[in-house]
């Protein structure tokens, strides 16, 4: 069994280029996940000079660890949006998801992309009596929104079902096969793509932005932040507008069934890929259940082949943040906060952001506006999100030497600094046990061999290299420092 995502098993070597000079462009896209690449794709026929950079390899962020359902049946999202806003806004969101699905299908067809796209029936299941009303309510709203909903009785794929509904015209695919094709199409259309190139700072420079990497800069008229969790705090104080949710996923051999399943309380999610079943469970707020081993143990099956962990941003109103970061500024744009539905929402972000860049109207621009006023109804969510961040910070400080760590992991003070040490048969790996983002102590994930931040989900490998934002810096221990 490997602690790695199923999607990362394709070991084909792909050519990568690192930024090796200062450059000037019209549009810089920071981040090469589904958001960044879809945005680049939609700009490919424009007269804009476009460049995309990724601190790692294309598609190796959150998108490489998704379950990759292309779905508009998203737990109980339509009743959540109706409750917070109105049925009209729920309909607006539904239309956006359906348009994004159609767009993905169109791209795959036009570009002849071989990414194992498959049409499936998707189920929403109430696995407890408490959840039955929620699923019935979602059924009612979807019916009002003119979706053909079927009822289903009996347990499905081993999930205890008290009540279930299903919808059609939903899809699954291989997310990395899709992104690699999109990358190649972008390159053929003169979009420059630099990998292993991290943006460390964005500075205003007259009418441009200067985006600094470790050695070079990129001067851009417009910048798209597509790096999932922004690596800067201001002007947009994200931690108050969302929280991070983590999940544990496994895949194992199984007969393929043309369906996806999700429970209304999101405790379980299933899809199939070729002869594999992909099973997600143990979702919780990032700052909770810090013992990764225990969480992994809950999802691992006897015949599990791959196991991995992933996280995504959950917004207070379940609608993503796509658009301007600052009022009166059309040049600094963002796409994030997809509530674990990034295949559709990352595509929607590409559609909206490219339209904004090219001065075209987009009917979903106001729906996803990141500057929308979060009214008093959200006070509870604001407090919850703030509490989550504080809880993560305190937990990380209080319980540094986790009792579940094996004898291979030690945290100790050296010259006043907290140092994390992982020893394998041959070597000792030392890192600073402090996240450079906001100073939280890190938790060692012994299964995936990473140091993980329980506050904002930065991750570092055993050598201390930052492999996931928002941290910009590594935590490699330098003896003579
Ligand atoms: C457990 C789980 C299951 C999910 N399942 C589904 C599903 O079935 N269907 C669905 O629609 N969605 C699903 N999602 C959600 C979806 O996977 C994400 O919302 C989506 O992949 C996010 O894409 P992204 O492009 O915003 O981020 P990423 O894929 O993380 O891309 C961001 C990129 O930015 C780069 N980067 C970061 N900082 C910098 C920097 N400073 N400079 C340069 N580059 C930088 C990173 O290296 C990364 O490659 C799931 C999420 C989770 C957690």
Image (cartoon, rainbow, N blue to C red):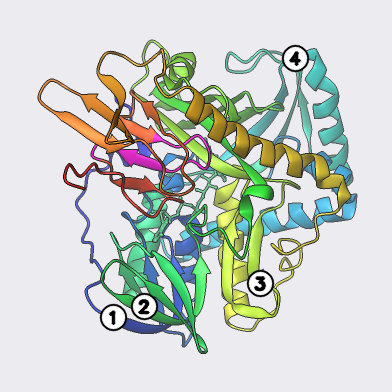
Which residue is labeled 1 in the image?
A: 22
Which residue is labeled 2 in the image?
A: 218
Instruction: Verify CB contact (< 8 Å) between mark 1 and mark 2.
Output: yes
Q: Is residue 74 visible?
A: no
Residue 33 position, x and y percent, is 44, 55
Image-based side of 63 in relation to 81, left or right: left
Residue depicted at x 39% and y 64%: 200
Q: Is residue 461 magenta?
A: yes
Label located before the other in sequence (1 or 2)? 1
Decide which of 141, 294 is in the foreground and name it: 294
Q: Which mark is residue 385?
A: none
Image-based side of 396 in relation to 144, left or right: left
Residue 207 position, x and y percent, is 52, 89
- Indicate which label's residue lies in the foreground, 3 or 4: 3
- Indicate which label's residue lies in the foreground, 4 or 2: 2
The magenta segment is 452-463
Q: Ligand 1 near label 1 (Cβ, under 8 Å)?
A: no
Secondary structure predominantly adopted by residues drawn in magenta:
loop
Label located before the other in sequence (1 or 4)? 1
Measured in 3D between alpha carbons, the distance from the residue under mark 2 to the one under mark 3, in whole angstroms, is 21 Å
Q: Residue most toward the top? A: 302
Decide which of 257, 93 is in the foreground and name it: 93
Measured in 3D between alpha carbons, the distance from the residue under mark 3 to the one under mark 4, in whole angstroms, is 43 Å
Q: Is residue 63 magenta?
A: no
Label located before the other in sequence (3 or 4)? 4
Which residue is labeled 3 in the image?
A: 326
* SS label for mark 1: loop
Instruction: Verify CB contact (< 8 Å) between mark 3 and mark 1.
Output: no
Label located before the other in sequence (4 or 2)? 4
Measured in 3D between alpha carbons, the distance from the residue under mark 4 to the one under mark 2, in whole angstroms, is 53 Å
Q: Is residue 94 visible?
A: yes
């Amino acid at each position: 069994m490997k602690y790695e995502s199923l999607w990362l098993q394709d070991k084909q070597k792909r050519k990568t280029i690192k930024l090796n000079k200062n450059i000037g462009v019209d549009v810089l896209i920071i981040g090469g996940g589904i958001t960044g690449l879809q945005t680049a794709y939609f700009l490919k026929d424009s007269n804009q000079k476009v460049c995309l950079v990724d601190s790692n390899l294309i598609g190796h962020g959150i998108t490489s660890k998704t379950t990759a359902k292309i779905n508009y049946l998203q737990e109980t999202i339509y009743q959540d949006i109706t409750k917070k806003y109105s049925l009209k806004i729920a309909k607006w969101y539904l239309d956006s998801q359906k348009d994004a699905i159609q767009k993905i299908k169109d791209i795959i067809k036009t570009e002849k992309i071989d990414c194992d796209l498959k049409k499936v029936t998707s189920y929403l299941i109430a696995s407890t009596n408490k959840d039955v009303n929620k699923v019935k309510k979602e059924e009612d709203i979807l019916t009002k929104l003119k979706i053909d909903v079927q009822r289903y009785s009996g347990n499905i794929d081993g999930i205890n079902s008290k009540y279930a509904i299903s919808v059609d015209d939903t899809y699954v695919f291989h997310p990395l096969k899709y992104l690699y094709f999109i990358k190649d199409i972008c390159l053929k259309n003169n979009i420059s793509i630099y990998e292993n190139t991290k943006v460390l700072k964005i500075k205003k420079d007259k009418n441009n932005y200067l985006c600094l990497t470790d050695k070079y800069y990129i001067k851009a008229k417009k910048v798209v932040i597509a790096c999932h969790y922004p690596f800067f705090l201001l002007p947009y104080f994200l931690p108050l507008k969302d929280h991070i949710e983590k999940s544990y996923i496994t895949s194992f051999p199984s007969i393929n069934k043309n369906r996806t399943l999700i429970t209304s309380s999101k405790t379980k999610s299933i899809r199939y890929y070729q002869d594999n079943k992909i099973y997600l469970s143990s979702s919780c707020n990032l700052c909770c259940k810090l013992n990764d081993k225990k969480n992994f143990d809950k999802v691992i099956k006897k015949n599990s082949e791959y196991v991995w962990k992933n996280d995504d941003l959950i917004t207070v109103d379940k609608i993503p943040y796509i658009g301007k970061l600052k009022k009166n500024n059309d040049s600094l744009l963002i796409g994030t906060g997809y509530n674990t539905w990034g295949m559709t929402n990352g595509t929607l972000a590409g559609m909206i952001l490219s339209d904004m860049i090219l001065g075209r109207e987009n009917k979903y621009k106001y729906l996803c506006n990141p500057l929308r006023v979060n009214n008093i109804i959200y006070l509870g969510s604001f407090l919850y999100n703030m509490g989550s961040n504080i809880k993560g910070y305190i937990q990380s400080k209080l319980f540094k030497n986790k009792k579940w760590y094996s004898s291979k992991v030690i945290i100790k003070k050296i010259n006043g600094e907290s140092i994390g040490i992982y020893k394998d048969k041959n070597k000792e790996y030392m890192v600073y046990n402090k996240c450079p983002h906001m100073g939280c102590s890190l938790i060692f994930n012994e299964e995936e061999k990473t140091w993980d931040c329980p506050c904002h989900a930065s991750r570092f490998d055993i050598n201390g290299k930052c492999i996931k934002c928002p941290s910009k810096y590594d935590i490699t221990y330098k003896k003579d420092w």
